[in-house]
Image (spheres, helix red, strand yellow):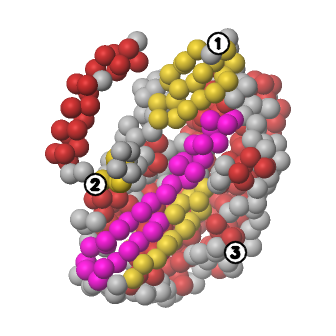
């Protein structure tokens, strides 16, 4: 008989609130189900109350780790709405920031996955190396988190000679360190025992479950927006997609480590190829009203495909901003991967997709009796939640035991 094992929404294993319920027989997981929505922030609805330019700074707060991916994806979509093409140099700088962000995100994740399996030495190494990338990002943009480098029609800051020199040094350093990390991961018995053969996701299942990013590529799926639908200057950039057929947590680690080397190569190519002079943005007044239009924008964020849908009704405020993050696409695969594994394997499997819960969470109110969706005001939602809690108080207390 399976026993229910709830983990979260608050749990030492979790960095953000999410409820994952596992059904176990002894120490083996036989089934699981996710329960999301604990950190829903209403960003999509708030975007309808902000102007097109104000939303640049709202969208980068969807995720602190991949803020440039969010802001750049939104700016890219807004440029389609406004029918404005950013200058060539702006695209180079925007792409440079995307790849620097991929470096610091992968370094952060590599430390986290090592911490989850109890190998904190490598956690210390990766986070120390990540500081070099953040120092460079700060030199270019003025900020370490939420860089605010993008604007509709280009970028806000040019890149200095000092930053170019530092970027070259950082790219060479991280590429060398990534090779060291790969050697450690492939030879250290502690890491291999906790990751090899754990969280198996076949190529067929990865495609069937619509996984994206390194999670999909670690299962042999050649899926990368940078090559599938080139944007920025990726179409000109000579880089290869990293694929692994291990299909387990170890493969996901190897893919991300090798992607750091590829990102370093892209950064060096950008520094050599980027125009030395030229405009970095198209002048566009914040009060400009776009035509009635709609657009989609896709970028390959560090965790995978990030998708934005934008709709304009001709006013200063978007009629609709829809965001689909890579974690939402990958969370279903976690439920598949944990089945048949021990309880102790849950942390590395969950961490293996590099989950970002707060950027994933969305809420849709559905009346199952009338089969219709509803939009609730803040006060209506508050009254509903109080009423629901009073009705289900006994059940809630039982679940918390």
Tag 1, which secondary structure?
loop
Residue drawn at x 69%, y 35% is 337
Residue 54 in the image, given as x and y percentages of width and height: 28, 68
Between discs 3 and 1, the one toward the N terminus = 1
Find residue 1 and name its label: 1
- Magenta residue check for 273: no
Please report the bounds of the magenta region as a residue range. Answer: 308-337
Viewer can see residue 175: no
Q: Label 2: which residue?
A: 375
Rendered view: 266 above or below 276: above
Q: Which circle's residue, 2 or 3, is located before the other in the chain?
A: 3
Q: Residue furthest front?
A: 369
Would you say 280 lies left or right of 30 here?
left
Relative image position of residue 281 (x, y in whole percent): 41, 83
Q: Which residue is mark 3?
A: 237
Please tell me whether mark 3 sits on a helix, a strand or a loop: loop
Q: Nearer the viewer, mark 3 or mark 1?
A: 1
Image location of residue 44, percent across then percent down: 35, 59
Q: Residues within 10 Å of mark 3 (few under 14, many from 20)?
A: some
Q: CA distance from mark 2 to mark 3?
A: 44 Å
Q: Is residue 55 visible?
A: yes
Q: Quadrant of residue 152?
A: bottom left
């Amino acid at each position: 008989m399976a026993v229910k094992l709830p983990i979260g929404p608050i749990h030492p294993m979790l960095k953000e609130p999410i409820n994952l319920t596992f059904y176990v027989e002894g120490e083996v997981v036989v089934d699981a189900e996710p329960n999301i929505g604990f950190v829903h922030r209403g960003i999509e609805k708030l975007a309808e109350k902000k102007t097109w330019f104000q939303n640049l700074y709202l969208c980068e707060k969807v995720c602190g780790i991949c803020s440039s991916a969010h802001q750049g994806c939104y700016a890219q979509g807004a440029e389609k709405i406004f029918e404005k093409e950013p200058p060539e140099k702006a695209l180079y700088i925007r792409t440079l920031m995307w790849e620097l962000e991929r470096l610091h995100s992968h370094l952060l994740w590599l430390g986290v996955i090592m911490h989850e399996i109890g190998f904190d030495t490598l956690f210390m190494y990766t986070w120390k190396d990540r500081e070099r990338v953040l120092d460079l990002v700060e030199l270019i943009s003025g900020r370490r988190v939420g860089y605010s480098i993008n604007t509709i029609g280009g970028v806000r800051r040019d890149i200095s000679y000092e930053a170019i020199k530092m970027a070259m040094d950082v790219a060479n350093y991280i590429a060398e360190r990534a090779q060291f990390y790969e050697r450690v991961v492939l030879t250290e018995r502690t890491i291999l025992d906790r990751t090899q053969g754990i969280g198996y996701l076949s190529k067929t299942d990865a495609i069937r479950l619509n996984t994206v990013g390194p999670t999909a590529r670690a299962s042999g799926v050649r899926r990368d927006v940078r090559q599938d639908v080139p944007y920025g200057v990726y179409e000109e950039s000579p880089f290869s997609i990293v694929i692994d057929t291990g299909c387990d947590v170890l493969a996901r680690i190897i893919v991300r480590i090798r992607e750091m080397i590829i990102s370093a190569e892209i950064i060096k190519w950008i520094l050599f190829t980027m125009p030395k002079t030229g405009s970095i943005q198209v002048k566009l007044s914040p009060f400009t009203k776009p035509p009635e239009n709609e657009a989609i924008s896709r970028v390959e964020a560090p965790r995978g495909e990030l998708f934005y849908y934008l709709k304009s009704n001709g006013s200063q405020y978007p009629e609709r901003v829809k965001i689909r993050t890579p974690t939402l696409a990958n969370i279903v695969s976690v439920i598949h991967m944990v089945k048949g594994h021990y309880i102790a394997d849950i942390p590395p499997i969950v961490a293996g997709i590099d989950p970002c819960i707060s950027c994933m969470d969305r809420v849709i109110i559905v009346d199952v009796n009338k089969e219709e969706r509803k939009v609730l005001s803040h006060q209506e939602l508050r009254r509903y939640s109080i009423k629901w809690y009073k009705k289900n108080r006994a059940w809630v207390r039982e679940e918390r035991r």
